[in-house]
Amino acid sequence: MDCSATAKPMIDAGDMLAETRERFCIPEGVRYFDGNSLGLMPKVVQLHASNVITHEWGTGLIHSWHDAEWRTLPQRTGAKIAALIGAEPQQVVACDSTSVNLFKVLVSAVRLRAGRQKIVTDSDAFPTDLYIVGQVARLFGLTVVGVPAREINDNLDEDVAAVVLTHVDYRSAEIYDMQAYTQRAHEAGALIVWDLSHTAGAVPCDLDGSGADFAVGCGYKYLNGGPGAPAYLYVAERHADACEQPLAGWFGHARPFDFAPDYKPASGTVRFLCGTNPVIGLSVLSRALDIFEGVCLSDLRSRSIRLTALFIDSVDKHLSSHGFAVASPRDATRRGSHVSLRHQHGYGVMQELAKRKFIGDFRMPDYMRFGFAPLYNNDEDVHALIDAIDQIMISRDWEKPEYQQRRDFT
Ligand SMILES: *Cc1c(COP(=O)(O)O)cnc(C)c1O
């Protein structure tokens, strides 16, 4: 029997995932490879935001704090995110920005390890993480040891209070072994803070299982919460009640509506809330997260790996002669959901791609980043992207004079 006649075409890992693309607004003619920077807008969000504004706010007004349960949105949204990062739900809250959350959890970690003098971090981390680590160190008179991620474990001793590491590197997409780094940090008596900004929603991880202490991450990347969506933070339950967070505001109080002059922290991760959170933004993020309901995380991961592998193979086959180098791990188990290429004319190539409605982004000095969001990118996107880059190189359209001037945002 001729197997090819009956064999199904190579379809997506799960039928579910072939269908989730339909749940997003994809602008006409656009091929989108920037879900690792700003996720596409889920269709349901439009109506939901309108309802929140018109009914919950416009009509319900102050009563919606109770009737629409605005007050527990950080916890309820956090619980949905927890399911994506291997955490029991009550340990995660959605609030503030990743930077602010890093500040809160890192100060808490340092206070739990009072007397120790150092914070160790990846010298190539996302800059905001480095700035916050620097500020916390300054406040507590500590030293920052910034080294390449791979050297972190060689720099741990009894003087290290905390390690701060991003699980999936924002430039290269390299995944750092959560279990192994966490274990090494603990052997040195230190606590570890994971940044999951490029993890949640694309790369499964196991915070509880690996024994992690703290984590933070973004709501607007693979979680599709929209521009400036609230971020989230995770605190292992065993630490929460011992934590003294530095931005202790009334929403983290045990009884905020007592309006008591003295601060008494809520028990658990809720104490990490500060002031009134943006209800509309939280509602949108929460609704966007419903897309993950019923999605199997291992299917999500398989699809992500398949797309990045297809892209890398195609670069090798069709683009290496133009001088493109793959700057992401070739070992799929060590690679997140985006692929970075390096090219001396990368900036011009990205500008010309954008002009042709292929949207990725550029990171200094010469990284061209392409995100493959497993909820909505497909094989066709990959093939079209490869063709477009090939054409741009052949036509030398990257050379246009207007691409010599760099813009602030790409
Ligand atoms: C995107 C990103 C952030 C963003 O921080 P915000 O304060 O939410 O703007 C932080 N860290 C990493 C690793 C990121 O990729």
Image (spheres, grey):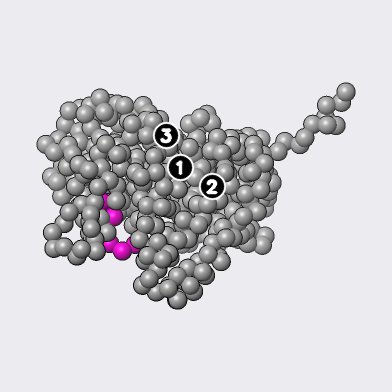
Instruction: Please state which of residues 97 and 326 is positioned toward the viewer in this rendering.
Output: 97
Instruction: Indicate whether residue 115 is drawn in magenta.
Output: no
In the depicted structure, whether residue 13 falls above or below residue 403: above
For ligand 1, tell me if the residue under mark 1 lies within 8 Å: no
Please tell me how crowded label 1 is: few (under 14), some (14-19), or many (20+) other residues with Cα within 10 Å. Answer: many
Kindly check if marks 1 and 3 are in contact, taking CB atoms under 8 A apart as contact. no
Pointer 1 or 3: first along the chain: 1
Residue type marked 1 = Ala
Residue type marked 2 = Phe
The residue under the point 87% across, 26% down is 2
In the depicted structure, whether residue 74 falls above or below residue 328: below
Residue type marked 3 = Asp
User: At numbered mark 3, what does the secondary structure look like: helix, strand or loop?
Assistant: loop
The residue under the point 39% across, 74% down is 61
Image coordinates of residue 392 in percent, x first then y, are 64, 52
For ligand 1, tell me if the residue under mark 2 lies within 8 Å: no
Magenta: main secondary structure equals loop
Residue identifier under label 1: 83
Kindly check if marks 2 and 1 are in contact, taking CB atoms under 8 A apart as contact. yes
Pointer 2 or 3: first along the chain: 3
Pointer 2 or 1: first along the chain: 1
Residue identifier under label 2: 292
In the depicted structure, whether residue 206 falls above or below residue 404: above
Region of the chain picked out in magenta, as a range: 271-277
Q: Say which quarter of the image contains residue 167.
A: top left
Q: Is residue 64 left or right of residue 274?
A: right
Q: Taking the image as drawn, is residue 167 in sight?
A: no
User: At numbered mark 1, what does the secondary structure look like: helix, strand or loop?
Assistant: loop
Q: Say which quarter of the image contains residue 161.
A: top left
Residue identifier under label 3: 206
Image coordinates of residue 106 in percent, x first then y, are 25, 45
Image coordinates of residue 259 in percent, x first then y, are 19, 65
